[in-house]
Image (cartoon, rainbow, N blue to C red):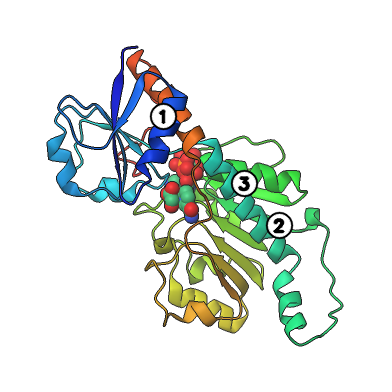
């Protein structure tokens, strides 16, 4: 393969670090900062719409994130270019850690112990064995399937839900709208790792909460718009839900006056559940460019009509 240029169009991205990562990943790939004629590949994240008309030869858009809803909503993004979702080991590992941490935190109700410590109270606390704890993962894609497999490995009674049927050893897999209620029925900890599409917007709402076990916990690491925030506050108020961990919120950064910040049962992280390792991400992009140049099908390509 002769040298290929990839435009780096990542808002606030560290160009020097990424350039070094690409140099290490493949001598045939050169990361460039300015749009040049003939550019076929771009690495983008929160890039301005004005960029796209300057790239008439763009063939593949590599998204720096897994969630690509912004790209699909931007009419300037050429439909002739393929969009590839980020799927790389660094991101999967960090998301898996976050999910495991939150599920264990709710399983062991560590937040009760944190509150007890505030009052110097030696709380005598019981909790079930993990195989008696019903945990469900909405979305069994790159991130959801890794999270579900790890939860299974830690002994949890794990279920997963996706659009098409999956088979993950030791995970009860449900598929499609027809099996959604069976998936949700009696779950004690629910994790959301769905993409944001018209079908999934607002999916975390009062109707869904009513299907979980009373006092269930919610972990949302997907997108803020999956959650109906008012429904979450009422469910926590009534005890229908016991707690929530939110890495994502409707408005980001979460405004200082937002009630989530000071709610005793809501744990906020600043949309950093998963982070990308430039070294492994550059290696993954180099692998995909080589596939593309060899006339093979790209992996993790967005299906525009499906919305993810
Ligand atoms: P992915 O590989 O595209 O997987 C999406 C999963 O959701 C698939 O299993 C898909 O089913 C399922 N799905 C989509 N629409 C559905 C529907 N209507 N009903 C049932 N299942 C549906 O995505 P990913 O890479 O795992 O990432 C998931 C999301 O995580 C991203 O879109 C992004 O919003 C979020 N994210 C957040 C962070 C963070 O730091 N907080 C970082 C990265 C990603 P099929 O398998 O049948 O297609
Ligand atoms: C981050 O939120 C991503 O979609 O990768």
Q: Mark 1 points at which residue?
A: 22
Q: Which residue is labeled 2 in the image?
A: 134
* Residue at left offset 50%, top offset 36%: 88
Find residue 288 and report its horizontal and vertical position in percent: 41, 24
308 lies left or right of 47: right
Residue sitting at 33 percent across and 51 percent down?
12
Is the CB atom of the residue marked by disc 2 within 8 angstroms of ligand 1's nearest atom? no
Q: Is mark 1 on a helix, strand or loop?
A: helix
Disc 2 on helix, strand or loop? Answer: strand
Residue at x-position 50% and y-position 56%: 272
Q: Do the residues labelled 3 and 1 touch (CB within 8 Å)?
A: no
Can you give x and y, in whole percent of width and height, for residue 217 in the image? Answer: 63, 67
Q: Quadrant of residue 299?
A: top left
Q: Can you say whether 69 is above or below 85 in the image?
A: below
Earlier in the chain: of badge 2 and badge 1, it is: 1
Q: In this view, does 198 lie to the left or right of 106?
A: left
Residue 271 in the image, given as x and y percentages of width and height: 47, 59
Q: Is residue 252 positioned above or below 48 on the image?
A: below
Marks 2 and 3 sit apart, C-alpha to C-alpha, by: 14 Å
- Give the image location of residue 194, x and y in percent: 47, 51
Tell me the quarter of the picture where residue 19 sits.
top left
Q: Find numbered disc 3 in the image and state the secondary structure of the residue it sits on.
A: helix
């Amino acid at each position: 393969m002769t040298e290929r240029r990839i435009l780096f169009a990542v808002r606030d991205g560290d160009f020097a670090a990424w350039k070094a990562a690409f140099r290490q990943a493949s001598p045939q790939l050169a990361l460039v900062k300015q749009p040049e004629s003939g550019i076929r590949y771009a690495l983008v994240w929160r890039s301005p719409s004005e960029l796209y008309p300057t790239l008439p030869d763009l063939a593949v858009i590599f998204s720096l994130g897994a969630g690509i809803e912004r790209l699909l909503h931007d009419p300037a993004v050429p439909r002739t270019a393929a969009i590839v979702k980020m799927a790389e080991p660094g991101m999967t590992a960090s998301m898996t850690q976050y999910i495991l941490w939150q599920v264990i935190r709710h399983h062991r109700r560590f937040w009760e112990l944190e509150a007890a410590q505030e009052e110097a109270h030696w709380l005598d606390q019981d909790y079930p064995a993990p195989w008696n704890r019903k945990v469900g993962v909405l979305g069994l894609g790159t991130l959801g399937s890794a999270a579900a497999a790890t939860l299974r490995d830690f002994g949890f009674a794990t279920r997963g839900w996706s659009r098409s049927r999956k088979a993950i050893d030791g995970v009860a897999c449900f598929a499609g709208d027809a099996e959604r209620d069976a998936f949700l029925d009696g779950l004690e900890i629910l994790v959301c790792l769905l993409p944001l599409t018209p079908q999934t917007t607002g999916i975390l709402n009062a109707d869904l909460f009513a299907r979980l076990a009373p006092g269930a916990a919610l972990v949302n690491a997907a997108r803020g718009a999956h959650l109906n925030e008012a429904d979450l506050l009422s469910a926590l108020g009534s005890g229908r839900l016991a707690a929530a961990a939110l890495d994502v919120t409707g408005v980001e950064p979460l405004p200082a006056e937002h009630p989530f910040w000071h709610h005793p049962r809501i744990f906020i992280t600043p949309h950093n559940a998963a982070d990308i390792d430039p070294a492994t991400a550059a290696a993954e992009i180099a692998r995909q460019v080589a596939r593309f140049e060899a006339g093979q099908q790209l992996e993790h390509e967005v299906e525009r009509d499906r919305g993810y």
